[in-house]
Image (cartoon, helix red, strand yellow):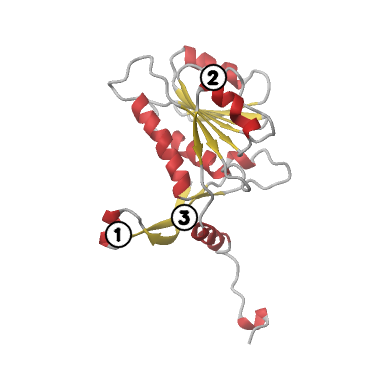
Amino acid sequence: MELQAVGQTLETDDGVQQSGALRSRLMVLTSDKGWPYSWNLKGVESTRDCYLNCEVERVWQIVKGDLTEWFSSHRGTYFTPGRHVLIGTAGIGKSMNAGSYLLYQLLHYDVEQLPMVAYFIGSQSFLFDKITKTVSLYMDDPRIEDVVNIFSLRGVKGYIIYDVALASRQPPAGLPCKGRGMIVVTPPDKNEYERWTKKMDAIEIVIDCPEENDVRAMCIWMKRNRPCRSKRDTGRR
């Protein structure tokens, strides 16, 4: 996987402003195998680029803060990591990039502290074993919820990303099981997440729509390999 910066803008942090340093406007995380949210789209080529702006990074920092607290030495044995619901922006939908970026960061998190990551999307579920460096695909039987629960009973910690890809497909009642943190990535439709949120007393995170400069940087990246047209080609004089 590669991580590249596209475009730059002034950082809002005072220390950075004083130094005159520039920060990246948009980061692009590239995977040759594509990203899970596009794996289940029939007839559609898997998306290789994952676009990351400050809003996507903000979501990861919230999850990372939970993990830091979960694995801190002063926490008791029965501490439970937070449950989160990431709600997309009206008119745009859910943030597919956030789910992919969270997966990337969780897979690169300390393997001894967080040896497993589960990713649910549509009818497919993926279980990433970071110790053996393998990934297992589950469809129906056995259910991944049962497999995850078995590892939880053995004391193996992990994190769950549940991507609401299908209408009215809320997380199963058994999730998350003991020893698991969890985040649900959903469109801004209460029918998709309200019941689970209330039951689990989950914390809602609302992701803002990308800024104009974010979209511009994204377009620049998408068009980077296109040949430039001359004025004669465009019909201009």
Q: Is residue 129 above or below residue 36?
A: above
Q: Which residue is mark 3?
A: 26
Q: Is residue 107 above or below residue 237?
A: above
Q: Alpha-carbon distance for marks 1 and 2?
A: 46 Å
Q: Nearer the viewer, mark 1 or mark 2?
A: 1
Q: Alpha-carbon distance for marks 3 and 1?
A: 18 Å
Q: Which x, y percent locates residue 28?
A: 49, 52
CB under 8 Å between callouts 1 and 2? no
The answer to which of marks 3 and 2 sits earlier in the sequence is: 3
Q: Which residue is mark 2?
A: 148
Q: Which x, y percent locates residue 147?
A: 57, 18
The answer to which of marks 3 and 1 sits earlier in the sequence is: 1
Res. 14 image quadrant: bottom left
Q: Residue furthest right?
A: 43
**Which label number is shown at residue 17?**
1
What residue type is disc 1 on?
Gln
Towards the viewer: 42 or 178: 178
Q: Is residue 163 left or right of residue 73?
A: right
Res. 95 image quadrant: top right
Towards the viewer: 121 or 197: 197
**In terms of secondary structure, where does tag 1 sit?**
helix
What residue type is disc 3 on?
Leu
What residue lies at 61% left-to-right and 45% top-to-bottom? 90
Q: How many marks?
A: 3
Image quarter of the C terminus: bottom right
Q: Is residue 219 visible?
A: yes
What residue lies at 73% left-to-right and 45% top-to-bottom? 43
The answer to which of marks 1 and 2 sits earlier in the sequence is: 1
Q: Within 10 angstroms of label 2, few (less than 14), some, or many (20 or more) residues? A: many
**Which label number is shown at residue 203?**
none
